[in-house]
């Protein structure tokens, strides 16, 4: 007689594949007499290693969603599971640990410290991370080997943003969250930055979410999540992903 197959724990299996599982996430800001509904019930599954783009008009809730996934903000209602744990139940200490260990953030404005070199800006993070890269290794990942000892003022906008990306990935984050990373850059420079993000997703396997206003950036994602008025309007799967250098916007 064939051995009985072991019981399949489908929840455990799902949790291994899934990085984020968000259900009914709402965020309401109370502004005096007025309630601002930034998110109105978002359900979203993100698979391990996936690259998604969040696309939508200004004010549609993209940053709010990214900030909640990254533990910078908490929802008013709803539940988010992160690798099988309930992120929305984390206390402050657990949330801080989660942000430090698991999440790399990149913002539109690079937020580098002007008086520190590229290496020193990256070392700020590697000093507090659990299993960091050497800052030089992180800077090599974004093709900045020759800018290691430069100060931010000695670098172009695109180079500064790549330092910010190196800083975000030097802790070997499980998830890389980028909020309009090319928003302050011209097309050519933006492509270099997107190329760095794409390579980090591929080489480190970091699950990646990039917010943009720009529809052509969406071509490089596995899936494109269209956000409108605090809701997910639609999700498109890209069968033929483009590499950053093929993008023109
Ligand atoms: P997006 O990133 O798509 O431009 P946001 O997530 O930043 O949109 O904002 C969604 C809505 O929530 C907007 O109406 C915005 O004004 C509002 N909002 C965002 N953050 C705050 C806040 N801290 N306090 C009050 N309202 C906010
Ligand atoms: Mg935003």
Image (cartoon, rainbow, N blue to C red):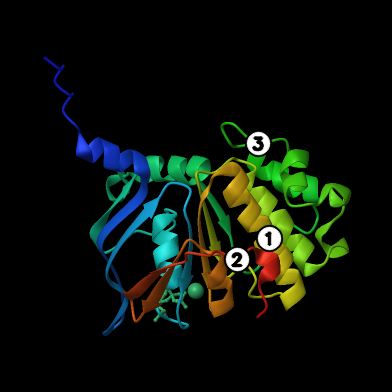
Q: Nearer the viewer, mark 1 or mark 3?
A: 1
| x and y percentages locating residue 45 in the rendered image | 33, 56
**Residue drawn at the location 36% of the way across and 43% of the way down:** 17
Q: Which image quarter is the N terminus in?
A: top left
117 on left or right of 53? right
CA gap, disc 1 to disc 2?
Answer: 11 Å
Q: Earlier in the sequence, mark 1 or mark 2?
A: 1
**Residue drawn at the location 38% of the way across and 76% of the way down:** 227
Q: Earlier in the sequence, mark 3 or mark 2?
A: 3
User: Relative to 198, is 61 above or below?
Assistant: below
| x and y percentages locating residue 143 in the rendered image | 79, 52
Few, some or many residues within 10 Å of mark 3 (<14, 14–19, 20+): few
| Quadrant of the rendered image holding ligand 1 | bottom left
Residue carrying label 1? 195
The answer to whether the residues at label 1 and label 3 have Cβ atoms under 8 Å apart is no
| The one of 169 and 50 positioned closer to us in this rendering | 50
Residue carrying label 2? 242
**Residue drawn at the location 78% of the way across and 59% of the way down:** 114
Q: Nearer the viewer, mark 3 or mark 2?
A: 2
**Residue drawn at the location 69% of the way across and 63% of the way down:** 193
Q: Quadrant of residue 124?
A: top right
Q: Secondary structure at mark 2?
A: loop
Residue at the front extreme?
1
Residue carrying label 3? 127
Residue at the top extreme?
1
Q: Which image quarter is the C terminus in?
A: bottom right
| x and y percentages locating residue 46 in the rendered image | 38, 54
Few, some or many residues within 10 Å of mark 2 (<14, 14–19, 20+): some
Label 3 beta carbon less than 8 Å to ligand 2: no
Few, some or many residues within 10 Å of mark 1 (<14, 14–19, 20+): some
Q: Is residue 110 visible?
A: no
């Amino acid at each position: 007689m064939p051995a009985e197959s072991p019981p399949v724990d489908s929840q455990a299996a799902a949790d291994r594949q899934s990085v984020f599982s968000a259900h009914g996430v709402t965020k309401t800001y109370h502004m005096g007499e007025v309630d601002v509904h930034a998110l109105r019930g978002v359900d979203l599954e993100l698979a391990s290693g996936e690259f998604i783009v969040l696309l939508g008009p200004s004010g549609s809730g993209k940053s709010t969603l990214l900030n909640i996934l990254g533990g910078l903000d908490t929802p008013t209602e709803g539940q988010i599971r992160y690798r099988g744990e309930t992120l929305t139940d984390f206390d402050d200490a657990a949330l801080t640990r989660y942000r430090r260990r698991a999440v790399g953030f990149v913002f539109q404005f690079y937020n580098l410290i002007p008086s520190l070199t590229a290496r020193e800006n990256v070392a700020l993070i590697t000093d507090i991370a659990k299993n960091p890269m050497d800052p030089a290794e992180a800077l090599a990942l974004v093709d900045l080997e020759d800018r290691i000892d430069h100060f931010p003022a000695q670098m172009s906008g695109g180079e500064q943003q790549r330092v910010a990306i190196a800083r975000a990935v030097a802790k070997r984050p499980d998830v890389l969250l980028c909020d309009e990373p090319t928003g302050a850059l011209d097309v050519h420079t933006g492509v270099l930055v997107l190329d760095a993000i794409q390579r980090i997703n591929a080489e480190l396997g970091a699950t990646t979410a990039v917010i943009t206003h720009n529809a052509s950036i969406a071509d490089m994602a596995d899936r494109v999540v269209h956000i409108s008025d605090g809701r997910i309007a639609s999700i498109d799967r890209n069968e033929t992903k483009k590499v950053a250098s093929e993008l023109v916007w």
